[in-house]
Image: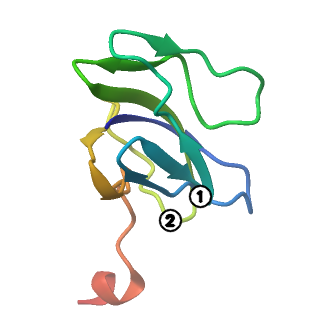
Amino acid sequence: MKVTCICVAGLPGQPETSASVNGDVITVDGVPYDLSAVPDGGFAEPGGDNHPFIGRIERIDGGLRVQLRWIYSDATAEPDQPAVQPVFMVIIGEVPDPIVRKPLASEAAA
């Protein structure tokens, strides 16, 4: 699955996004989304506001492509994030954290 992260600073106290992939299922913040019904060469357009997707979910040459709204905390993130949206190919496992983080206190002291 090709996952493009659209990174958005969250409100204070808002939980940060986490996601994992297992085949055609992507789990975002503990909620599984089974995308196996998206046909090859086709797409799905998620409805409503109660999902993490931005734009169409597509399947091209057998592979799914999704864009996720990735919420992060300003408290742990560097103020300058890359201008290019991070893209990850994940077949099974965690979607890597796309956020450039501030050094931990122990790293900063070293």
Q: Nearer the viewer, mark 2 or mark 1?
A: 1
Looking at the figure, which quarter contains the C terminus?
Answer: bottom left
Which element is circle 2 on?
A: loop
What residue is drawn where x is 35% and y is 29%?
Answer: 64
What residue is drawn where x is 34% and y is 16%?
Answer: 40
Q: Nearer the viewer, residue 96 or 89?
A: 89
**What x and y, as percent, mark residue 107?**
29, 84
How busy is the neighbourhood of tag 1: few (under 14 within 10 Å), some, or many (20 plus)? Answer: some
**What x and y, as percent, mark residue 86?**
31, 37
- Tag 2 near tag 1, CB within 8 Å: yes
What residue is drawn where x is 53% and y is 52%?
Answer: 27
How busy is the neighbourhood of tag 2: few (under 14 within 10 Å), some, or many (20 plus)? Answer: few
Give the total of numbered labels: 2
Looking at the figure, which quarter contains the N terminus?
Answer: top left
Whether residue 52 is situated above or below residue 84 in the rendered picture? below
Whether residue 47 is situated above or below residue 51 in the rendered picture? above
**What x and y, as percent, mark residue 101?**
38, 62
Lateral position of residue 102 relative to residue 73, left or right: left
Residue pointed to by mark 1: 16
**What x and y, as percent, mark residue 76?**
50, 65
Disc 2 residue type (three-letter): Thr
Residue sitting at the far top:
41
Instruction: First in sequence, mark 2 or 1: give its number.
Output: 1
Which element is circle 1 on?
A: loop
Q: Nearer the viewer, residue 11 or 41?
A: 41
* CA–CA distance in space, label 2 to label 1: 10 Å
Q: Quadrant of residue 92?
A: bottom left
Lateral position of residue 21 relative to residue 29, left or right: left
Lateral position of residue 39 relative to residue 44, left or right: left
Residue pointed to by mark 2: 76
